[in-house]
Image: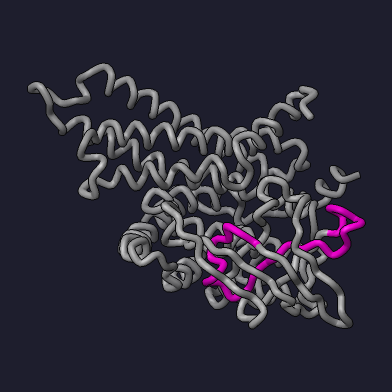
Amino acid sequence: MAAQHINSLRTPVPLNTVDRDAFRDMCRSFAEKEIGTRWQQADAEKRFPRAFYQAAARTGLIGITASEDIGGAGLGSYEEAIAMEEMSKVNPNLAVAVLVQNVAGSILYEHGSAEHREIARRTIAGECLVAITITEPEAGNDIQNVQTRATREGDEWVLDGMKSFITLGGDADVLVTLAQTDSKLGRRGMRFFAVDRHDPNIEVSQIETYVNRPAPTYRVTFNKARVPESRRLDAGFAAIMAGFNRERIMVAARWLGHMQTALNWARDYAQTRRQFGRPIGANQSIAFALAQAHVDVEAARRLTYHAAERWDSGVPLRDVILDVSAAKLHSTQAVVRVTQTALHVGGGWGLTTELPVMRWALDALVAPVTVGSVEIQLRAIAKEMGLPVD
């Protein structure tokens, strides 16, 4: 029954077409102009530059897959992956802010009322920054263990609980929040709420991290925050799983872009850095490591775009999970290997702030544990292979 309900969310829709080469060029130009000039200052200040979000909205990169009637482009996940890859080549952490807007927006416009669709429209227009508040201290991969409670009181819901590791949680205007409305129903009692982040009964505190600093991470605490019934979405666990799988394609594209940049740098550095009278790339140990990194990058590219094509085809979710999980698993493991290779090629200088590779390697460490850990992806793949894993 659950699988049928999830698959009911995979209704094929006609997609607009676009010259993908021209679209990629546009995304690359945007990234160089809007991310390249902002991310270092934002990183140092550990704050999110809202002007970047507004620039992305003006360029049409928010709501790429949303319908045109709310300001979206009506394109597919393939184009969304292109945008994510090109932005992440410059900085994967500002790129993730666009990812969050697109995933949260899709929950609002695909499963919400007219009021929710208006929030999505404002998000696409650059007027309303949103964050997704699902993860909790005891509910990371274990989403069914969400403890945040929503209690009905007349025409309102009262939310109590704590969320953790919420990207943009303190910067957003609206929190797309998952809460349990009836503990007796388990996952069937889960619902999303579009919560005003400025409610005085919501507290946010930034979590200091080594990564994701231009898109800060927060704890969000609901202490009897009140939400109108009209802000409750008719979407729960099935929507979560469908959303996670689409998001995993974008995560794969994010780390694809990041590792491509690291590989390009390492290759060029190995050709110019000289030791013992010749470029270090003339040594087999370096050359072979870079050759292996090339294979990692190209495999990630093929797995990612294959998964995006499968998603856009409208096949049932159960038929695309294997492709999505394989892309996410490989990309998030490969980016660690490739950035570590780049760090090694940089040698002692790679550990300094004069070269960018240490930061690349640090950013990559978050990849295997977000939006479904390595173990979660392996379990999904094994089950799709017909193996009796529990």
Judge whether residue 17 can be spotted in this image.
yes
Q: Is 77 in the magenta?
A: no
Q: Which quarter of the picture shows residue 383? A: top right
Q: How many numbered marks are there?
A: 0
Q: Residue at x 60, y 50 (%)?
A: 77
In the image, residue 117 sits, relative to residue 390, either above or below, namely below
Q: Quadrant of the N terminus?
A: top right
Give percent across and percent down for residue 100: 57, 60
Q: Residue at x 69, y 43 (%)?
A: 313
Q: Residue furthest top?
A: 284
Q: Quadrant of the C terminus?
A: top right
Residue bounds of the magenta highlight: 163-189
Q: Residue furthest left?
A: 277
Q: Residue at x 39, y 53 (%)?
A: 91
Give percent across and percent down for residue 318: 77, 38
Residue closer to the observer: 127 or 379? 379
Q: Residue at x 43, y 52 (%)?
A: 211
Q: Is 180 in the magenta?
A: yes
Residue closer to the observer: 168 or 125? 168
Judge whether residue 66 can be spotted in this image.
no
Lateral position of residue 388 relative to residue 124, left or right: right
Lateral position of residue 289 relative to residue 51, left or right: left
